[in-house]
Image: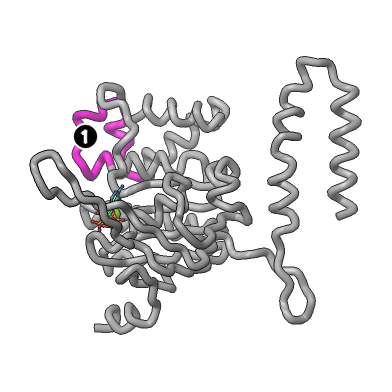
Amino acid sequence: MVEMFRLLLVVGRTFFACSSERRFPLIELIKDFPSIILSMISVRHDFSGRTVNEPKIILNHISKAFARKAETGLLRARRACRAVLKDVTLEVESGECVCVIGKNGSGKTTLMRILSTLVQPDNGQARICGFDVVKQGREVRRRIGVMLNAGDTGFQPRTSGLTNLEWYAALYSIPQKEAHRRIQRWLQDLQLADRGSDQIQSYSSGMRRRLALARALLSDPEILLLDEPTLGVDPWTMEQIHKQLRSYVMSGKTILCTTNSLTETRALARRVFRLENGVLSESAIKEELSC
Ligand SMILES: Nc1ncnc2c1ncn2[C@@H]1O[C@H](COP(=O)(O)OP(=O)(O)OP(=O)(O)O)[C@@H](O)[C@H]1O
Ligand SMILES: [Mg+2]
């Protein structure tokens, strides 16, 4: 707490000492203060009274239902609800990779969309790095790299993979030199170096998926949310991607990955959950993996 007040004091003094044009970044910093302070105090106490940082990803009794439009006539539609997530609870610690598997339509993408702040849950709470995904979306988005199921959306098809990544790097405010270094690195590591200058519309679907992964990794996020990242990727490249993701986790980052590939779960995660009937269960998948 004392450090927090010292920090406030320093920022206050600097603010009044600055010329007006230099105050702008300080105003930005001050705007973020409430959420920064919230994250600083988002610590839990264990039984011995020590403070422990909370898990990087927390899902607490999340539920989500979508309105279902059933066609009943030529122009009339009857509205009903379909509960997709009923009671999803999960904690992912820092430096951990957790996989979620589930049948088509079980709600994997919905779960990822909730964590990426694209969809709001009906009930329950989801937190990333101590920030609430509904109330503090901006802070959450700063800390996540996302690759959703249709991973190649958001790219300009007539421009090259390289230009697209440069564009996203500018959106993330990554300095130009650093952006160039990261783009070259990920194009190389994801076996796209020789196609970087080609138009995206000439890429195969597996190549687009790899480019989407490069985009998710570009901001060097603390948390990586991957929705079926290697769907349609050949087994040789898949092995390379798993190697990269393992080293990413080794460097202290956190990954939540949905997949329907048991090879992927074995390669990446120590904990695997199955999403079925809107609920996550760990024990069932262990039996499934051992057969
Ligand atoms: N915007 C929406 N409006 C209505 N229903 C939706 C919407 N988004 C998802 N759903 C429904 O929610 C359920 C879960 O969809 P979701 O895409 O999360 O499943 P999934 O596990 O990712 O499936 P897949 O393995 O095919 O990718 C499906 O029944 C789907 O029809
Ligand atoms: Mg999906």
Q: Is residue 205 on the magenta stretch?
A: yes
At x 54%, y 49%, the residue is 134
The foreground one among 26 and 121 is: 121
Q: Measuring from the top left, give residue 108's x and y in whole percent.
A: 33, 59
Look at the image and tell me in which quarter the C terminus lies.
bottom left
Indicate left or right for 203 with 109 as reference.
Answer: left
Residues drawn in magenta: 189-208
Residue 230 seen in the current view: no
Viewer-side residue, 125 vs 7? 125
Q: What residue is pinned by disc 1?
A: 203
137 drawn magenta: no
Q: Residue at x 60, y 46 (%)?
A: 136
Q: Position of residue 141 (x, y in %)?
A: 53, 43
* Image-quarter location of ligand 2: bottom left
Please identify the quadrant where the N terminus is shown. Answer: bottom right
As helix, strand or loop, the secondary structure at mark 1 comes to loop
Residue at 77 percent across and 73 percent down: it is 50
How many neighbours does mark 1 have within 10 angstroms: few (below 14), some (14-19), or many (20 or more)?
some
Taking the image as shown, residue 211 lies to the left or right of residue 291, namely right
